[in-house]
Image (spheres, rainbow, N blue to C red):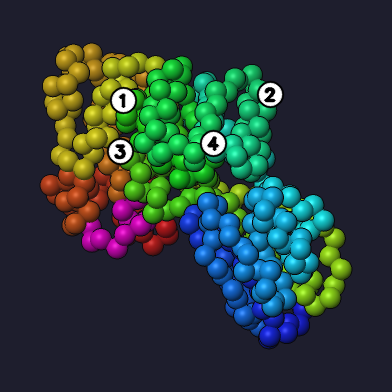
Amino acid sequence: MNSKYKKNPNYHVALIIETSNEYARGLLRGIKEYLNENRPWSIYLGEHSRDHTDLSWLKNWKGDGIIARIETKEIASIISEINLPTVDVSADRFLPHLPCVETDNQAIAHMAADHLISKGFKHFGFCGEMQFPWARQRCQFFIDYLKDKGFPCHTFESSRNKSWTKDREDMALWLESLPKPIGIMASYDILGQKLLEACQLANVAVPYQVGVIGVDNDELLCNLSDPSLSSIVPDTLNTGYKAAEILDRMMAGEQVEPELHLFSPMKLFTRVSTDVVTVEDTLVSEAVQIIRNHAYEDIKVEDILKHVLVSRSVLDNRFKKALGRTPHQEIMEIKVNLMKQLLSETDLPLSLIAEKIGFKHVEYMNVLFKRKTGLTPGQYRKFN
């Protein structure tokens, strides 16, 4: 990411980008990386969010350029009046004469659909805030891709005009009405987290009855969700970097074509919300949900039997038929996945990890982990 363009150290640049979500913060990190590798600008980052668009200060602002998420006609009108070199970082394209740098929403929708299909889902849904064009794009790309593969898709429109509680209750009613098991794409992580809360309200098991995937990979939000939320990682760093590079050229006097520059998503993080091969056996689904709810404890098959009220042999046979493994193997599988998460995301010593996920002996935990992954816990932590 090296630039040949010389910069005026006195450039004053306004960033009309909210800081309330991971995608926008990723754009800001990309812009910062460009500035780190080149001579810095004087940055103005005013208070701004999708629900707060008072940019009247821009009319009297004496600057050289703007990078903006132009998501409303009001923002577009103000920026048009100012007539400064501007790069748009929104899918809305309210000002099509400006260069635009955005994530590839079609690639994101296809990645989400392929992931859910690979997990065995045959029913699908999309949950989005449709007032935003990028959400509508993701929804339509998701629907069209599934239609080409012979799958219908159910949709739910979340609204910021409703309270969080009312919107979540409406989601729960929608979830209750859907065929199951079903894989659902949320337009972004914040909505995915709300959808997981609605699943609890509707008493549907995640991921066995409903699988949920979001977008942005907001690690704090994804891991605070219950269960943790699978999410797609957009390439925000390069998106923000490219926007800064284009603006730099414009402020230097270069004529830049109003092209749309799209960046494909980087990867997908699978967490508990889609960590499943779907099964239609409700008893197995209930048993797995019990395991997940008590995965941090020293849970045993006998504890499951107290709830599902069938014999050990019946439970074993139905697990093998549905999942290809026994209830005990499922317990170990889930605990190993918890180990991977704790090894990757924390610096906790192995003794404390063993204590946290219900192993009485750290030695047994280490042997199990190596048998499952081919690596010692220390090796896994080093490479992840």
| Placement of the N terminus among the 4 image quadrants | bottom right
Mark 2 or mark 1, which is nearer to you?
1
Label 1 environment density (alpha carbons within 10 Å; few <14, some 14–19, many ≥20): few
* SS class, disc 2: helix
Question: What amino acid is at disc 1?
Answer: Asn
Q: Tag 4 or tag 1, which sits nearer the N-term?
A: 4
Disc 3 target residue: 334
Label 3 environment density (alpha carbons within 10 Å; few <14, some 14–19, many ≥20): some
> Do residues under tags 3 and 2 come within 8 Å of each other at their CB atoms?
no
Mark 3 or mark 1, which is nearer to you?
1
Left or right: 50, with 67 as reference point: left
Disc 3 and disc 2: Cα gap in Å? 34 Å
Disc 3 and disc 1: Cα gap in Å? 21 Å
Confirm whether the magenta stretch covers residue 60.
no
Q: Tag 2 or tag 3, which sits nearer the N-term?
A: 2
Label 4 environment density (alpha carbons within 10 Å; few <14, some 14–19, many ≥20): many
Question: What amino acid is at disc 3?
Answer: Ile
Q: Is residue 284 above or below residue 207?
A: above
In terms of secondary structure, what is the magenta stretch mainly?
A: helix
Q: Tag 2 or tag 4, which sits nearer the N-term?
A: 4
Residue 113: x, y in percent? 57, 33
Disc 1 target residue: 203
